[in-house]
Amino acid sequence: MNFSHGTCYCLIAISLTVVSIDAQANHDIIFNEPNEQWIEGDFDLHDQDALRHLATETDAFGFRQQLSFAKSGHGIEDRQLVNIDNVQTLDAAYNLAGLYLAPRGWEIYAGLEFSFEAAGDNSTIESLDIDALYALRRFGSNRQYMGFGRQEVEDDRAWMIDEHIDGVSYVMEADNFALTGFIGSHNQMLEKLIGTHEQHSDHHTKPHDYIAYGRVYRALDEDKQGSAYIAFLSDKDFEQGERNIYLGLRSLGDFSDNGSYWAEAAFLTGNSETRDIRAYAFDVGISYNWNDAVFRPGYTLGFAYGSGDDGIGSDNEFRQTGIHANESVLTGVVDLKYYGRVLDPRLSNLQIITLGLNMRPRDRFSVDLLYNGYWQIHPSTDIKADGIDVSANGSDHYIGSGLDLVAGLRNWSNLSISLVYGRFHGNDGVNADVGRLEFNWNL
């Protein structure tokens, strides 16, 4: 496919999902009324919430199934500094999830995925993965619980964590206060217990052996919340023997009837084989919609900064966790990669300016146009990114820009559709012009 004068990278993903209820939350903690029957928090209970309603109506059992297909292909104008392995792939996956409401307040949740991948060289990969398998015990008028096993963990904006964790989780919620935490490992404990090995092909680079995480939330007023967290990540074979501790603060909320904001800051300390790590990052922004105007136009302004290293003294380069996703809803109705879909950079030795325009002519339909500009703090040939493998010349601060167009229709007669076209254009030192196209259909 060709979307410009040069050749571009294109991906088309089509998915068909069979579900009965689709739930979505836009904040990590919603301070519920005391009579609410479940908790919204860092732990992704969206599937569980939907299945819980089904189980109540169908004698303690609820099931969900999903079938998805994806076909991808790409072309690149200049391959000198860009590396993408597969020219064409065809992916298919079948997911099955179930929930059992057991006696005495226990719930058992399990999710399996069978996937098939065919590459352009006629090679195929088949795998059966365990997405989730845990027991949940609710107590204290359903406002706190403990979970045991593999559970999905996702903080709001997925800036720190968006992954399945094997271990023990805890959530407690009061009227204006909440606490979440877990301790475990990243997709390893379960495999070791049952003697299998799961392939890891998502946004992280390698599994973490040990993870501990805790966050305290506080309602600042009716429309704002603040939180503080600590996270520890350590690997037996972690790159350069790193042991990282993250200390962070976050605030989210509305500053007017039409406007919202986010503010995030983290300090990273730890050590590698040769140097101590002392780094920091922050991300701030606002979104605003004119809800009374035709098509309800809006805008988003954001600035993110991840410190870099000059090679002197302590290692000052910030690292995101590797189990993050950098994905959230801004002013539209569907999730998007807020640092750019094609490059999908990690906030490391990088500052990013984000400008967004939005239209939302209907409650369930929106169109977002998002621009990101990228500058390195200390010029380097290494650009840490999860989208494409691209290098710079190591002398220029500015490395390029990204532009994404995202149109989404959500929960219209149980149908959700999104169309995403993204483009990354590097400067002369990066020498890359890469595009990406995605189409998703969920029923």
Image: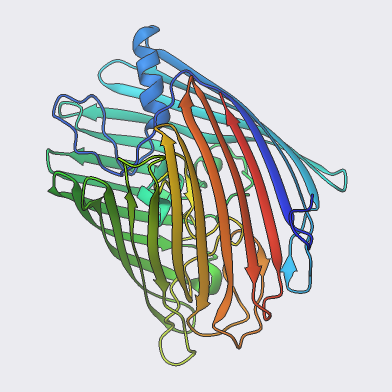
The image shows residue 432 at horizontal and vertical percentages of 71, 70
- In the image, 66 versus 199, the foreground residue is 66
Residue 314 figure quarter:
bottom left
Relative height, residue 61 to residue 45 (above, below): above
Asked whether residue 205 is in view, the answer is no
Relative height, residue 52 to residue 385 (above, below): above
- Most distant residue in the right direction: 122
Residue 257 figure quarter:
top left
- In the image, 150 versus 224, the foreground residue is 224
Q: Residue at the spot x=44%, y=49% of the render?
A: 358
Q: Residue at the spot x=55%, y=56% of the render?
A: 204
Q: Residue at the spot x=67%, y=76% of the render?
A: 430
Residue 431 figure quarter:
bottom right
Q: Is residue 435 left or right of residue 97?
A: right
Relative height, residue 46 to residue 398 (above, below): above
Asked whether residue 340 is in view, the answer is yes
Q: Is residue 29 left or right of residue 82?
A: left
- In the image, 411 versus 382, the foreground residue is 411
The image shows residue 125 at horizontal and vertical percentages of 76, 41
Q: Is residue 221 left or right of residue 298?
A: left
The image shows residue 181 at horizontal and vertical percentages of 29, 48
The image shows residue 413 at horizontal and vertical percentages of 48, 19
